Image (spheres, rainbow, N blue to C red):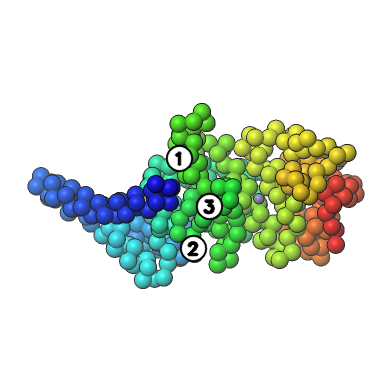
Amino acid sequence: MNKKMFWLFGLVLFCCLLPLFYAKAAQALSVHMKKSVLAENGSGVCCLDNYLEIGSFSKTGCSGDKKNLTTIKAKNKYECRKKTLQKKYRFADYYKTTDKFALVCVEPCSFNDQKFFDSSFVGDNIGLAKLKQATGNILPKQKMEIHPDKDGDCEYNEYFSGSSGYKDGHPFICMANYYWFKKLKGTQVERDYGYYEKVKSQTLTVHEPIHNIFHDYQKGQAPDYVIQESFCKAVSLTIAGQADNYFSDFFSGNYTLKNPPSKSVAAYNNFFVYSLASRFGFDENDMKIFFQKYVSDSYSTKRGNARVKAILDEILHQDTAASFVDLQISLK
Ligand SMILES: [Zn+2]
């Protein structure tokens, strides 16, 4: 059975057996615990996130983002789902939020694992707090919607990694974390739930929103991908501990300033920050100042790559053209 069939079969099996299981369980319990079963059936609420337009069922109440959340009555998940869909919102099997981001898995969700989801939420909060430190408090402008794995809105990409974009004007980030959680089981690099609560698992949660920052503050005129990607990698790999600093060999690989990578090799996307660090001493503190200046109005006359250069020239007190030349980046 291939993987797709396996999941499809699993899903069908799950969907068919679940009502049966509930019916049986309810019957058995009702004999001894009639009162508590009734209480159980009546507990829980439906949480509507009116900004992301997502509904989800919660047994403990709606919290985390007062401004955007409405609580409505629902006896159970199925009633909540019905009310959510009536509102033309998406229904999430898993949902947890703060006012900065929501971690969601909208139906059909690729996993059935509350512990994985809860651990991911803990980790994402840590990752985003670290991102804020690295950018001097700069995050994407709007609340982010983060999906930890494939679901009704996200597909796996060819590398089973992450992607960022927008949905209805807010950042929309897809990852493949559960895919790897399953895939690596039984190997030497197996991951437990605790892994997802640590900063070392936060590479993508740090990386992807940086693309959104680049776009948010210069709509349609963000700098070239190679510049963005290099900043995303430098920040995320340093935070997650996969690189020591911006001068790390990781960014250059087998390449040096005298022998920069060509556009056709992967290291090309890492090299810009390496070049800035090697040539001009660009470091983590400069990165912080860079983002603060990037979102300010002081550079509003310059766009795209030219704006990046103007900021770098000012921070580093030098003409940084050589780093742009290293990567054959246009300044027009
Ligand atoms: Zn990227």
Residue 101 shown left or right of residue 310 in the figure: left
**Sequence order check: which comes first, mark 3 or mark 1?**
3
For the residue pair 144 and 8, the one nearer the viewer reads as: 8
List the residue tagged with mark 2.
Answer: 52
Label 2 packing within 10 angstroms: few (<14), some (14-19), many (20+)? many
**Sequence order check: which comes first, mark 2 or mark 1?**
2
Residue kind at label 1, given as amino acid type: Lys
Is residue 83 visible to the viewer in this orientation of the structure? yes
Q: Are marks 3 and 1 in contact (CB under 8 Å)?
A: no
Residue 273's quadrant in the figure?
top right
Label 1 packing within 10 angstroms: few (<14), some (14-19), many (20+)? few
Query: Is 329 rendered above or below residue 276?
Result: below
Query: Is 226 rendered above or below residue 279?
Result: below
Mark 2 vs mark 1: give the one in front.
Answer: 1
Is residue 136 visible to the viewer in this orientation of the structure? no
Residue 266's quadrant in the figure?
top right
List the residue tagged with mark 1.
Answer: 182
For the residue pair 132 and 223, the one nearer the viewer reads as: 223
Task: Estimate the spatial distance between the alpha carbons at disc 2 and disc 3, rounded to whole Å.
Answer: 21 Å
Residue kind at label 2, given as amino acid type: Leu
Label 3 packing within 10 angstroms: few (<14), some (14-19), many (20+)? some
Please, what secondary structure does the residue beneath circle 2 have? loop
Q: Are marks 2 and 3 in contact (CB under 8 Å)?
A: no
List the residue tagged with mark 3.
Answer: 156
